[in-house]
């Protein structure tokens, strides 16, 4: 059963819970498809027969993001680098020393601005809470940036999907469902492109650090 089929087969309330949980778990630092869940839920909300509310999809994602990041912050505050080491050992394909070092660099340079922008970048979404806690950023500032980023991210995706879905249903009728599936794929592709761009920055930063360490020897 595909993820779309799963969400179609459960009651709307359960859809919101699943989306909130996936976004929350991702925000703690575990690589699960939180953004995919948000996009999928938003796409399904454009189908009236499913009785899924786009607004509640966004609210569920927002709540999951704020709570998940706050849990990640708390764990990072208490366990610090040990948490990141454990996550890296558990998810070596997603969490590497170079990615952590680059994210640490961004926090050191931009502070809570990294929390806001990181909500839109998959890898930073996972690191934001734990790193903010590890680096002892003031929680009120972190919470404000976290909530603002989550609201723009969840609300922005839901609104765009709703607008496109409404237009598709009005003007294309039978083709609207196919168009929305295309929109889902485009959203995932954009996420991949942004992720690749982030990876190139990680590699460049790692190379720069390596060069600096070689010069200092």
Image: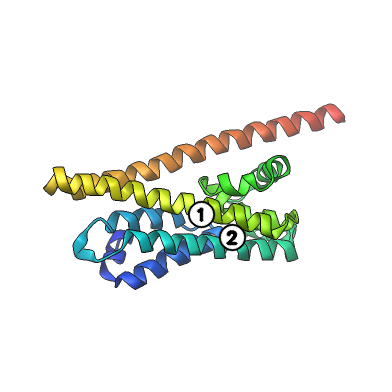
Q: Nearer the viewer, residue 160 or 19?
A: 160
Task: Name the residue located 49 percent from the left edge and 64 percent from the top edge.
Answer: 63
Q: Nearer the viewer, residue 33 or 166?
A: 166
Q: Quadrant of residue 189?
A: top left
Task: Name the residue located 59 percent from the left edge and 60 percent from the top edge.
Answer: 69
Would you say residue 93 is visible in this rendering? no
Q: Is residue 65 above or below residue 100?
A: below
Q: Nearer the viewer, residue 33 or 50?
A: 50
Would you say residue 100 is visible in this rendering? yes
Disc 1 crowd rating (10 Å Cα; few below 14, some 14-19, many 20+) is many
Residue 51 lies, in percent from the top left, at 24, 66
Reading the image, the residue beneath label 2 is 69
- Discs 1, 2 touching: Cβ within 8 Å: yes
Looking at the image, the residue that sits furthest to the top is 215
Q: Secondary structure at mark 2?
A: helix
Q: Quadrant of the N terminus?
A: bottom left
Residue 56 lies, in percent from the top left, at 37, 64
Disc 2 crowd rating (10 Å Cα; few below 14, some 14-19, many 20+) is many
Task: Name the residue located 81 percent from the left edge and 33 percent from the top edge.
Answer: 213
Disc on res. 150: 1
């Amino acid at each position: 059963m595909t993820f779309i089929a799963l969400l179609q087969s459960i009651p709307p309330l359960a859809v919101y819970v699943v989306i909130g949980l996936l976004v929350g778990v991702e925000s703690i630092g575990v690589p699960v498809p939180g953004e995919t869940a948000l996009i999928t839920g938003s796409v399904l909300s454009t189908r009236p027969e499913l009785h899924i509310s786009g607004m509640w999809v966004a609210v569920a994602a927002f709540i999951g993001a704020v709570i998940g990041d706050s849990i990640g912050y708390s764990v990072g505050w208490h366990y610090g680098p040990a948490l990141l080491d454990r996550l890296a050992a558990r998810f070596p394909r997603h969490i590497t020393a170079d990615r952590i070092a680059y994210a640490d660099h961004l926090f050191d340079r931009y502070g809570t601005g990294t929390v806001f922008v990181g909500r839109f970048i998959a890898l930073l979404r996972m690191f934001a809470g734990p790193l903010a806690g590890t680096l002892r950023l003031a929680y009120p500032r972190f919470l404000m940036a976290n909530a603002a980023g989550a609201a723009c991210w969840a609300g922005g995706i839901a609104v765009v999907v709703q607008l496109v879905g409404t237009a598709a249903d009005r003007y294309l009728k039978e083709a609207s469902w196919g168009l929305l599936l295309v929109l889902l794929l485009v959203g995932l592709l954009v996420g991949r492109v942004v992720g690749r761009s982030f990876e190139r920055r990680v590699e460049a930063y790692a190379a720069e650090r390596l060069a600096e360490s070689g010069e200092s020897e």
